Amino acid sequence: MITGSRGMLGSKLVDALSSGYEIKGIDIRDCDITNRQEIIKIINDYNPDIIIHTAAYTDVDGSELNRQRAFAVNAQGTENVAEAAKVIGAILFFISTDYVFDGKKDKPYAEQDRPHPVNIYGESKLEGEKIIQALLRKYFILRTSWLFGPGGKNFVTTILEMAREKKALRVVKDQLGSPTYTLDLAGAIKSLLDNCCWQEADNFGIYHITNSESCSWYEFAKKIILLKQLKTEILPISSSESKCPAVRPKMSILDNSKFITTFKLNLRPWPEAVRHFLLNDEENKP
């Protein structure tokens, strides 16, 4: 079962796993994960072996303005899904975020680093992580970052929309992370499931999965404009100049070593992934 199955990552997971797995996708139009009785009944009725929980409230700035909504979906909704998974003995995969960290580290964050979110979105996702760890033994918490891909609002599509309207864009230069392509992340999760060792007790836990290499939002925007051969000028600004409601960690690069070592999987560099997205997605073709 895949929650959030019509979302940017969920839809790619449905595509990736439809070959070889029996899939049931559920989305907000099917049920509300914050409705405990409703989501537990749906999960019990389908009785899946595996639940991949992608449904989330992902509006980082919106979370600052609506803390109750962020925690209702990302924490309470996750608890409802985890409780249902516990009852039927399903293995739960939870998609989490680099924003559980405060960005004060000077090198990539590893799984054992202490989370300390600086915004409400990160707090709500961390609470979801804690709930899963308290309720379940068989789980995967997969932290990823800066997701982009078809079927949802993301940095790539936002930059392209703004570039069509403006001659210059101001983009933050002092926040670092690893852009991650939903197609590649979905493929990595499929490869994990296809790997015969994934159900070994020692392999459950937290993993970081992103496309390889890192950049700033400014460098990310520059690459998008270059690949699309647009004339829009990208101007670097500091975080303090951005005036976003939510504080972002200045350094949220994730160390993927544990995932690579355990499952022998490594995602391609993000510039290659962005190129693939821009050249293959119908809405973004030249």
Image (cartoon, rainbow, N blue to C red):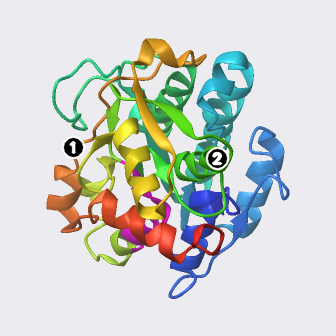
* In-image side of 216 versus 91 (left or right): left
Magenta highlight: main SS: helix
- Magenta range is 179-190
Q: Can residue 107 be seen?
A: yes
The nearer-to-camera label among 2 and 1 is 1
Q: Residue furthest top?
A: 240
Q: Residue furthest bottom?
A: 19
Give 53 or 179, whichever is nearer the viewer: 179
Q: Quadrant of the C terminus?
A: bottom right
Q: Amino acid at mark 2?
A: Val
- Assign a secondary structure to mark 2: helix
Q: Position of residue 12 (x, y in %)?
A: 56, 69
Q: Which mark is residue 255?
A: 1
Q: Quadrant of the N terminus?
A: bottom right
* Residue at left offset 21%, top offset 22%: 105
Q: Which mark is residue 81?
A: 2
* In-image side of 245 versus 185 (left or right): right
